[in-house]
Image (cartoon, rainbow, N blue to C red):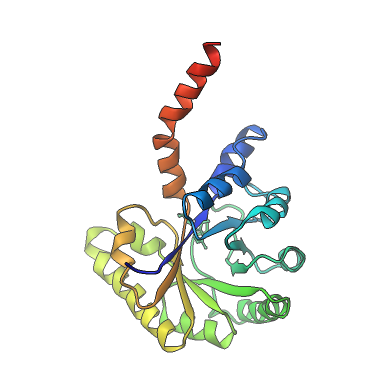
Amino acid sequence: MNNIRLHVNVDHIATLRNQRNTKYPDPVQAAFICEMAGAHGITVHLREDRRHIMDRDVEILRKTIQTIMNLEMAATDEMVGIACTLHPDIVTLVPEKREEKTTEGGLAVLNDNVRASLKENIKKLRDAGIKVSLFIDPEIDAVNISKELNADIIELHTGDYCNAATCCFSQELLRLEKAANEAAKLKLTLAAGHGLDYVNVKGILHLKDLKELNIGHSIISRAAICGLEFAVKDMLEAISE
Ligand code: PXP
């Protein structure tokens, strides 16, 4: 039995809602069910374009989440202002591009401008008493820079591992293992996420001192299929009256 915590990302519920501008499905209700099912935390990404999670969601979630609220966001003035008012338990800083479907890679911490902006924003967030996690590629340099930047947590981007063809799979796993070992040496709390599903997650559970996983798409996708039987039965009941 390991003690790895699961933070469920409920952005995809909001995506479905926003496609029709309806009130349902509500990420707030989804978060509640995730917590009831034993999730250790709820992750939401407030994007600059509000394409899924919206301001109303984070405001209500802050009042209703009973576990840990992990707010993913870009390191911009607007987002840092929102976070300092909202006060989530954790802020995970991620790179953000408008045209991407989902976060495509870790923060470009080797870039001087990115590093300078991160440094300033990490300080503001930590001064406000918020733990800061940096979403980074599984590279030793990136882990070391995260430590220098005073991050509390690093979240290793598992996308390349999850997408790796059979030929490159062990190479991608090795990258994650080396980055995790470095994080353990530096006493950084280790999280991982992106693209993890019910099968590939098993391959990374041994990462040294892995404390937390952020998983969204595979869980919400399974809910769409496994929860469908109940949804149809409920509808049959509704129309039979
Ligand atoms: N971690 C980070 C930093 C992310 O940006 C995302 C996607 O929003 C996730 C984890 C979850 O990824 P997935 O939906 O593929 O499980």
The quadrant in which the C terminus is found is: top right
Q: Nearer the viewer, residue 3 or 216?
A: 3
Picture residue at 58% right of the left edge, 52% below the top = 99
Picture residue at 47% right of the left edge, 49% below the top = 37
Residue 233 spot, x, y in % from top left: 45, 22
The quarter holding residue 196 reads bottom left
Q: Is residue 192 left or right of residue 74?
A: left
Picture residue at 66% right of the left edge, 73% below the top = 130
Position of residue 153 relative to residue 38, above or below, is below
Residue lying farthest to the top in this orientation: 241
Residue 169 spot, x, y in % from top left: 26, 64
Residue 132 spot, x, y in % from top left: 60, 74
Position of residue 69 relative to residue 138, above or below, is above
The quarter holding residue 108 reads bottom right
The quadrant in which the N terminus is found is: bottom left
The mark tally for this picture is 0
Position of residue 49 relative to residue 179, above or below, is above
Q: Is residue 155 left or right of residue 204?
A: right
Q: Nearer the viewer, residue 68 or 101?
A: 68
